[in-house]
Image (tube, coloured by chain):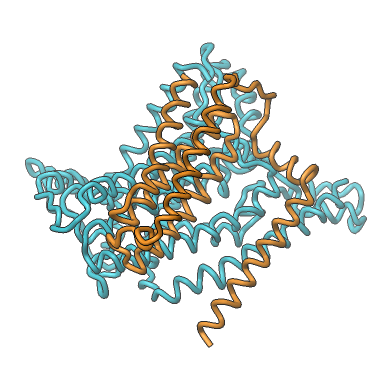
Chain colours: A cyan, B orange
Amino acid sequence: MATSTVWVSIFLFALVLLAFAPIMTWVERKQSALMQDRIGANRASILGFKALGLIHPLADVIKMITKEDTIPTGAHRFLHLVSPFIAVAPAIISFAVIPYGGTYEMWGAHISLCVADLDYGVLFVFAIGSIATYGSMLAGWAGNNNFGMLGSIRVSAQMISYEVALGITVVGLFMIFGTLRLTDLGVMQQETFRLFGFLEHFGWVAADANWIDWITIPMWGIVLQPLPFFMFLTALMAENKRAPFDTPEGESEIVAGYFIEYSGMKFGLYMMGEWIEVVVIAALLTAMFLGGWSLPWVREADMIAAWTPALGENMANLAAMLLAVHVFLIKVIVLIWFQMLIRWSMPRFRYDQVMNLGWKILLPLSLANIVVTALGILFVQGVTS
Amino acid sequence: MRTALFWIFSLAAVASALGVVGNLRSPINSALSLVVSMLALAGLYVLLEAQFVGLIQVMVYAGAIVVLFLFVIMLLNLRGSGASGAESQPIVKALGALVVVAATLWLARTLSSGRAPWPDVEQGFGTTRAIGEALYTDYVLSVQVAGVLLLAGIVAAVVLAKKKID
């Protein structure tokens, strides 16, 4: 990839990221208000201009930055300082491998809408995410607070438990597509398959029946692996430690858990990390299970080819790129909404319920899924060959 | 660029490895030094075009195993307990120092004998596909043996845990 196009993708990526994180505070407030029959954030105003409460994120930031930054006595000063950064940085870095569009040729430039198109893209997200554990774990320990300590122990147990399930749930998807590269996954999910194609193979329908050619299903991850989609979402939400998996924070038992000793913007960084992770989860699920940046039943290459006579090659590519980014964003927004819906509908799980869900339900189910998927692949290979 | 990165990563690895054993004040600091060492090693693997191994290093060692170490340290609340037992065993100490010095000298001699150039690898080396193919064709027996070993470990863990519950 040429240097100039790297800048293009980094610019778009930073734009999306910086726009999303503060707005998430507003989204969460408004959605929880809607769900609880309240009005929600609507008081902050600049010269009487309220913009549906969208000024609240700005007010929040000003409050966080101007608050006193306390360091408790007996705290490990260095770790207390760096923990919030360890918690936030991985969430931001994981965006690097998520593609929000394909590759486009326009005006002699080759533009790839993925900052780092790595061969092991999904593993990169998992590896970086596993580092985030330290941010939460050390926070509770460094603050020299017993409640924080309990929070740390819960965080580490929960995150390790769900990392196991997290990796194994998606093995089935990789078995089907045969790649870990997220851009390849995006391209492969543009294909379709004939839902009743197997009838033809067994000779159960007339050979000239063309209706089976019409009923096609896009090869989206969620279609091929419906159960793992929800298991993966569950595991990711548990990794993010938001309700219903927020036992490490557990206000009613351990006050605020691992970030109890943080104030001001350091506390804000933990909140920001959580919200950025909500976006990362949505983007990752979109790229892996919801067809990435493409519309269902539409191959992007075909679309560009169809538009080229009318628009010219450059404009067709540009239009396809803009469409891809918007499709991706809409899918991400829907998944963010879905996560917020879960977060505000479910009460906090008890600690033993969290552990049971991880080890006794998600892990066996995901292992069984590997076997079932393998049998399915064998069946499909037998039918198509 | 590559050489500069090599020096950065290797210095970090060695310094943090010394930090693991040299830090007597707090076991948490030792564990964190171990994390830095693991991450630096992962960087070295990536420099050697073994990206997959580097990533697994981060995921498994830095991201899971040392987290478990930290979990145990926190659970037992080993806060600043200092070096325990080592003071009373001068023979063990001397022996350890001797081994370290000998190993360092041997390493230095081996390394100074010749400077290895950066390896030239073929296209696709170190990718997930290449590793998968190697594991399931040439080394399939080793994979199976490792799998059985891990299964034995899991069963043993269950047996040990059950004994405590009963």
Q: Is residue A281 left or right of residue A209?
A: left
The extreme bottom residue here reads: B166
Residue lying farthest to the left in this orientation = A47
Q: How many marks?
A: 0
Question: Residue A208: x and y, percent?
Answer: 90, 47
- Pick whichever, A53 or A132, lies toward us: A132
Camera sees residue A338:
no
Give how far across and how far down residue A278 sits, in percent: 39, 51
Q: Position of A359 compared to A14: left or right? A: right
Residue drawn at point x = 35 percent, y = 47 percent: B22
The residue under the point 75% across, 51% down is: B142
Relative horizontal placement of residue A51, taking residue A203 as reference (left or right) = left
Residue at x 59%, y 40% (from the top left corner):
B53
Percent position (x, y) of residue A379? 82, 56
| Picture quadrant of residue A199 | bottom right
A154 or B18, which is in the foreground?
B18
* Depth order, front residue of B14/A105: B14
Q: Residue furthest top?
A: A108
Q: Residue furthest front?
A: B91
Q: In the displayed structure, would residue B25 be above or below residue A36? A: above
Q: Quadrant of residue B134?
A: top right
Q: Is the residue A152 above or below the residue B34 in the image?
A: below
